[in-house]
Image (tube, grey):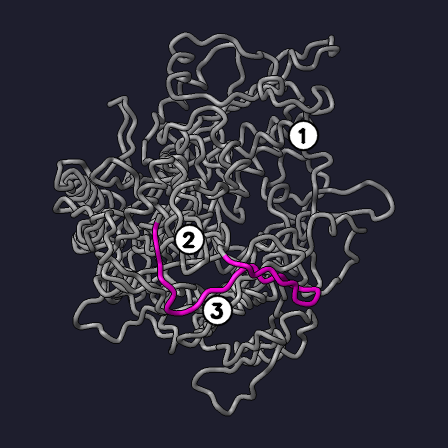
């Protein structure tokens, strides 16, 4: 394999999310392009039968077809070629899983999730097996229901199958939080081993399903494939087995001859990359025959080219059979694809499957892939054990089953720990890795059961994290109450090399290993210790440029009459909304920093905006208290090159204002009702940073980097030691409020002049600090330095959030109907810490 030639997209990148998807090999794309450009492919539903002996043709027609086909120039084209290729690739898939001849059908699906959903829909959860005795008394249907068991380490797509079971049984059971009332049970590996060692009859007259992954996509644990064989040999019980092979198949094909599961599912992009993201459902013909015999498909959805005939005025229809010679043939002779594949298949994605398998063969086959990947796994596991802090604490907390009987695939789930054994948030690590072009996964990877078990969640934690803290999958709340809410995942594939392993290890060592005990900053303050506010910055439009208050000038702290939370006058009055309804940020649109306020008139509330570096573009003036910003929306849309809307915070209404009639359809996004102003601010009303801390971060060779990248409201200059603010925050951390975003600390107080502010939390930094606020250019130096510098505080943080606590003065004037002045703050004011 030539990495530069086969994967040019990986130049300068280190890719470790192979369990998510494998990068597309260039040879696969080239072969697919060549096939599509040199062959005519048509819609398979337009196929003319190639069964030349069919009785549908007269003898004369058969002779003409045979004569044409004997011509040396004759070849399949159009729809016939498409149909032929699809059938060939079905056979390739059957060979890939070593399916016994004639025992399995291949159904192409949108992805693995769609295949699992299809299985859930096929099984008659309220019916008894056709091969078992049906009970005459049906007064208590629950006694005859089959069981749905799923392993607790399953992907959410498997767990979601239970909803189909509930849907079919809810009329008898009603709504219930007790899954076992529906015949549903989440089981642990120990439960399965105990059951198989002494199996008891479940429901002899019903279909039971056990679903589990061949390989856990969270930890890489490989569960025994022999469970399939054991379940199917339990006497007097109809057990069906479903194996989720999506993760397992990345290096090892499932073997359906040795382990004949009723169903097997996987996706091709997890095997050899795209451009095929389709999935496959392998399903035993024996089971399908039973389903046809009990009439499971009698009222099944049909569409596209799946039917031989439909009467639009009556209920009659007939699925297509293999040929056209006998449309009255019985249902069990009809191909399963006509029941389970509706509409035109994704032909081009199916064609890519052939070239993907061919690429694996060129690499030396699966045996060679496994050998290559196993060497890399051994290298990484050894390196992980050697990553330790100055005091011997391991950097890596690796998640593995306690039972040594399990093998592991090429997946490593882990968290990072500080020298004091506290957790470093996975989101922070993932973000820094991304900035350095290292691709790893963070979160629970759609495997809540494994995540909750390995991270030690107690019963009720998930609900509490959601209800109390607002935590949900994909957000940035990576540590709550000192416990991680997810993990990091490195998944290795054939695209990886020893160099990529070393790059990952070097990244972790350079940014997260503490090689010496950090110096504790002196928290004492003497008469010679001075600090003054060196800058005040207002950000009228969220995520856009800032306005610097002039030296010696004072600025109002105000409370808007219909909003909560005092703030700097004019700060975050507007935000920009995209066509999808989401707020635009510099993370995705760094050019927003070039939209800058040129002047803010405190007396009138008018703000003049311009575009930095483009004097030819007209400026625009806005009133803070005017909510109709159509002209401004058009102005910003022209700058960004796509339609967006400028939304004013004065469109926000208090909960008492929201008790209105439902919004009419098509309401303009600029007129939407929002239930809180917090959408316009970050974690608190003010952000304070230290000039000394920034100077300490700044490498000598990077004096062009600016403190404005940290986008703070207040910057103070002092003769305090660098990162003195870490010791302020440490006081808050000891109150266990550091990671509790919904509460405010009752710890230390900051005084700026007569303004009294309360410390809330440290500011965890994202990749926005890599953006030069004067040009929009990216530079990762500051972010890397933020993690590499030895300090007391949590790595990845810079600055502290503050909230208004009071003002030791006489100001309290109502200005018009819009806001109240609560205090004043000015550049040069002294800064004190209580």
Q: Do the numbered discs 1 and 2 sit on residues whose CB atoms are within 8 Å?
A: no
Residue placed most toward the observer, 793 or 238: 793
Q: Position of residue 70 (x, y in %)?
A: 49, 64
In magenta segment, residue 810: yes
Q: Which residue is mark 1?
A: 167
Query: Which of the two discs, 1 and 2, labels the residue nearer the N terminus?
Result: 1
Q: Which residue is mark 3?
A: 538
* Closer mark to the observer between disc 3 and disc 1: 3
Residue placed most toward the observer, 663 or 572: 572
Query: Which of the two discs, 3 and 1, labels the residue nearer the N terminus?
Result: 1
Q: Is residue 503 left or right of residue 633?
A: left
The answer to which quarter of the image holds residue 715 is: bottom left
Part of the protein shown in magenta: 809-833
Number of numbered discs on residues: 3
Q: Position of residue 259 (x, y in %)?
A: 38, 27
Q: Is residue 517 something one can see in this rendering?
A: yes
Point 33% across, 71% down: residue:
778
Query: Which of the two discs, 2 and 3, labels the residue nearer the N terminus?
Result: 3
Q: Is residue 351 something one can see in this rendering?
A: no
Q: Is residue 53 left or right of residue 809?
A: right
* Closer mark to the observer between disc 1 and disc 2: 2
In the picture, the disc for residue 801 is 2
The answer to which quarter of the image holds residue 339 is: top right
In magenta segment, residue 302: no
Residue placed most toward the observer, 724 or 414: 724
- Mark 3 is surrounded, within 10 Å at the Cα level, by few (under 14), some (14 to 19) or many (20 or more) other residues, namely many
Point 48% across, 32% down: residue:
103
- Mark 2 is surrounded, within 10 Å at the Cα level, by few (under 14), some (14 to 19) or many (20 or more) other residues, namely many
- What quarter of the picture does the N terminus occupy? bottom left
Q: CA distance from mark 2 to mark 3?
A: 15 Å
Secondary structure of the residue carrying tag 2 is strand
């Amino acid at each position: 394999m030539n990495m530069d030639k086969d994967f040019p997209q990986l130049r300068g990148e280190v890719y470790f999310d192979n369990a998510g998807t494998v990068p597309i090999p260039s040879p696969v794309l080239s072969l697919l392009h060549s096939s599509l450009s040199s062959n005519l492919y048509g819609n398979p539903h337009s196929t003319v039968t190639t069964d030349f002996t069919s009785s549908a043709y007269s003898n004369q027609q058969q002779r003409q077809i045979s004569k044409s086909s004997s011509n040396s120039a004759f070849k399949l084209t159009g729809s016939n070629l498409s149909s032929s290729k699809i059938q060939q690739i079905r056979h390739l898939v059957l060979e890939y899983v070593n399916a016994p001849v004639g025992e399995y059908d291949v159904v192409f699906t949108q992805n693995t999730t769609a295949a699992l959903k299809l299985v859930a829909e096929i099984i008659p959860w309220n019916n008894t097996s056709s091969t078992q005795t049906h009970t005459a008394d049906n007064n208590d249907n629950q006694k005859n229901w089959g069981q749905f068991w799923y392993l607790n380490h399953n992907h959410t797509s498997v767990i979601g199958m239970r909803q189909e079971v509930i849907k079919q049984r809810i009329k008898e059971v009603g709504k219930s939080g007790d899954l076992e009332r529906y015949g549903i049970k989440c089981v642990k590996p120990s439960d399965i081993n105990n059951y198989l060692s002494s199996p008891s009859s479940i429901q002899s007259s019903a279909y039971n399903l056990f679903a589990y992954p061949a390989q856990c996509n969270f930890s890489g644990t490989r569960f025994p494939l022999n469970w399939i064989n054991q379940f199917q040999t339990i006497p007097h019980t109809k057990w069906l087995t479903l194996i989720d092979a999506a993760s397992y198949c990345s290096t090892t094909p499932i073997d359906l001859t040795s382990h004949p599961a009723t169903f097997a599912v996987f996706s091709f992009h997890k095997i050899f990359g795209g451009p095929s993201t389709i999935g496959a459902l392998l399903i035993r013909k024996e089971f399908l025959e039973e389903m046809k015999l009990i009439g499971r498909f009698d009222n099944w959805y049909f569409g596209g080219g799946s039917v031989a005939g439909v009467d639009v005025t009556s209920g009659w229809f007939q699925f297509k059979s293999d040929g056209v010679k006998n449309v009255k043939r019985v249902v069990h002779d009809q191909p399963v694809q006509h029941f389970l594949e509706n509409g035109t298949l994704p032909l081009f994605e199916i064609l890519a499957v052939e070239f993907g398998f061919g690429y694996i063969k060129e690499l030396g086959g699966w045996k060679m892939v496994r050998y290559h990947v196993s060497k890399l796994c051994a290298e990484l596991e050894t390196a992980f054990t050697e990553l330790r802090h100055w005091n011997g604490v391991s950097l890596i907390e690796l998640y593995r089953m306690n039972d040594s009987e399990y093998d592991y695939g090429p997946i490593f789930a882990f968290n990072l720990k500080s020298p004091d054994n506290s957790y470093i948030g996975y989101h922070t690590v993932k973000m820094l890795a991304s900035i350095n072009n290292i691709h790893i996964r963070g979160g629970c990877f759609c495997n809540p059961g494994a995540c909750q078990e390995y991270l030690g969640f107690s019963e009720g934690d998930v609900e509490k994290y959601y209800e109390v803290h607002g935590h949900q999958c994909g957000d940035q709340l990576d540590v709550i109450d000192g416990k991680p809410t997810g993990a990091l995942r490195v998944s290795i594939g054939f695209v990886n090399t020893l160099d990529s392993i070393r790059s990952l290890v070097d990244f972790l060592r350079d940014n997260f290993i503490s090689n010496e005990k950090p110096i504790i900053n002196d928290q004492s303050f003497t008469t010679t210790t001075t600090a003054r506010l060196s800058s005040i910055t207002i950000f009228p439009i969220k995520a856009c440029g800032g306005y610097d208050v002039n030296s010696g000038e004072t600025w109002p702290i105000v409370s808007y009459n219909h909003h909560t939370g005092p703030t700097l006058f004019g700060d975050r009055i507007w935000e920009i909304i995209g066509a999808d309804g989401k707020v635009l940020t510099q993370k995705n649109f760094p050019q927003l920093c070039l939209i800058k306020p040129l002047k803010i008139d405190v007396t009138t509330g008018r703000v003049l905006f311009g575009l930095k570096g483009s004097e030819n573009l007209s400026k625009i003036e806005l009133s803070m208290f005017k909510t109709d910003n159509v002209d401004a929306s058009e102005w910003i849309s022209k700058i960004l090159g796509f339609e967006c809307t400028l939304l004013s915070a004065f469109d926000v209404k208090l909960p008492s204002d929201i008790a209105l009639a439902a919004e009419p359809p098509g309401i303009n996004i600029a007129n939407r009702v929002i239930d809180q102003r917090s959408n316009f601010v970050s974690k608190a009303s003010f952000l304070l940073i230290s000039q000394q801390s920034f100077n300490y971060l700044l490498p000598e060779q990077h004096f062009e980097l600016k403190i404005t990248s940290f986008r703070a409201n207040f910057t103070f200059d002092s003769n305090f030691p660098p990162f003195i603010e870490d010791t302020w925050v440490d006081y808050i951390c000891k109150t266990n409020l550091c990671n509790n975003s919904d509460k405010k600390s009752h710890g230390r107080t900051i005084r700026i002049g007569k303004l009294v502010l309360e410390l809330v939390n440290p500011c965890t930094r994202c990749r926005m600090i890599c953006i030069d606020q004067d040009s929009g250019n990216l530079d990762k130096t500051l972010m890397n330095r933020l993690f590499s510098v030895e300090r007391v505080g949590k790595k990845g943080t810079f600055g502290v959030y503050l909230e208004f606590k009071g003002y030791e003065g006489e100001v309290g004037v109502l200005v018009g109907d819009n806001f109240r002045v609560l205090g004043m703050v000015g550049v040069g004011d002294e800064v004190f810490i209580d």
